[in-house]
Amino acid sequence: MRAGGRRDTTTGANAPAFHPIYLRVLGAVLARRAVEIPALLQASRAPIRDEDAMLPLAPAREWMAAALTATATPWLGLELGAAAQTHTHGLVGSAAFASGTLEEALQTIARFAPLRTRALRFDWRPTRAGGELSITDALDLGEARGFVFDAMLVIIERVLQSLSGTSMRDACYRVPGLAPAWLERYRDHLEGTVHFVRGDVLRLQFPAELLARSCLTADARSHARAAAECARLLEAHQQRRRVGERVRMLLADSADRLPGAEEIAAQLHLSTRSLFRRLADEGHSLRALGDELRSERARFWLRDTDLPIERIAERLGYADASNFARCFRRWTGVTPGHYRQGPAVSGHRDSGTAR
């Protein structure tokens, strides 16, 4: 795969990354090559029950890497992009195809792309010459990064071709990394000019004349309806992403006893299973959030009250002071007694956090 510098954007192996329909398309591409990856095939056949469903990062990344290895085809991402159809993109595709101009379509894609993938970040900006869509990795895609960028590049160009019915030869694509030995494959799949550049951002640049072209399928009412539904789903997703913050507030509002998983889930109108899943999606765990609050309360009571350590342990829900002491040392690096004696002794007075 192409090399290129990238910042550490990992948010956990369980982070939601791609809508599963793209996995189905990958499975179809592999089937045409008579290549079978059992785990991927089984997953791709699973029913999709939710428009906002997402495949976790880890298996998606592993299956893409396995597909590249099994086919010995480094340009497989280009083939995946070419295989994606209009319906593959769901409501985001519907909103884009009803846009008035190509610029509006690109703005729509950039705004609502998180409904189809959360592994990438899309940003649209106008330029003196026209406009630019930049794509960066929001999650650590590892060796699958070039594969994903290639697929997105072809998908977006094909969408714009379908919308306008015109050539994209005036578009310019700046792909991060060194030019591969199979450069001609880009010419087979793309009309726009491809340049390989330093950095870690995929940039799709379009001249103003091209952006101003009307879409063949323009429908203002349909676009408004589809965009409104996309906005509703995106807001619902953002609310779910804030479950960790809501759990923190519920824990902070508790008195001596921290609420358990079932109690928290009921207050958030979730099942316990959904609570754990959504916290994992955000990179949290209920235990870690509880430890974070226990650490804060323990340090406050040790620093600003005369409560005996045994009583603090009891108020925090520990069976005995020794269990509390072990946890406190894990959080702060010192024992409760040393912490209480002050910074001159502990050196960690206000720096401890739950880990």
Image (spheres, rainbow, N blue to C red):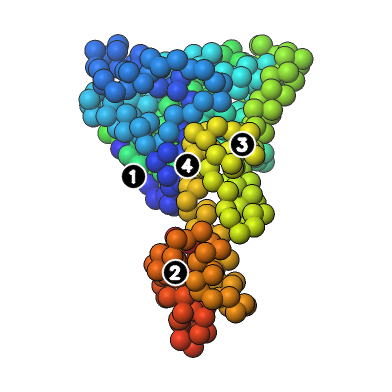
User: Quick one: 48 or 32, which is closer to the camera?
Assistant: 48
Q: Against 307, is 128 above or below? A: above
Which callout, 3 or 1, points to the residue nearer the camera?
3
Q: Residue at x 48, y 47 (%)?
A: 285
Viewport quadrant of the C terminus = bottom left
SS type, badge 4: helix
Q: Amino acid at mark 3?
A: Ala
Q: Is residue 329 left or right of residue 229?
A: left
Give yes or no for contact between labels 3 and 1 (Cβ–Cβ under 8 Å): no
Residue located beneath label 4 in the image: 280
Q: Earlier in the sequence, mark 3 or mark 4?
A: 3
User: Quick one: 280 or 4, which is closer to the camera?
Assistant: 280
Viewport quadrant of the N terminus = top left
Residue located beneath label 2 in the image: 321
Residue 109: % across, % down: 60, 28
Q: Is residue 209 left or right of residue 36?
A: right
Crowding at dot 2, Cα within 10 Å, few <14 / some 14-19 / many 20+, comes out as some
Residue located beneath label 3 in the image: 266
Q: Amino acid at mark 2?
A: Ala
SS type, badge 1: loop
Q: Is residue 120 left or right of residue 96?
A: left
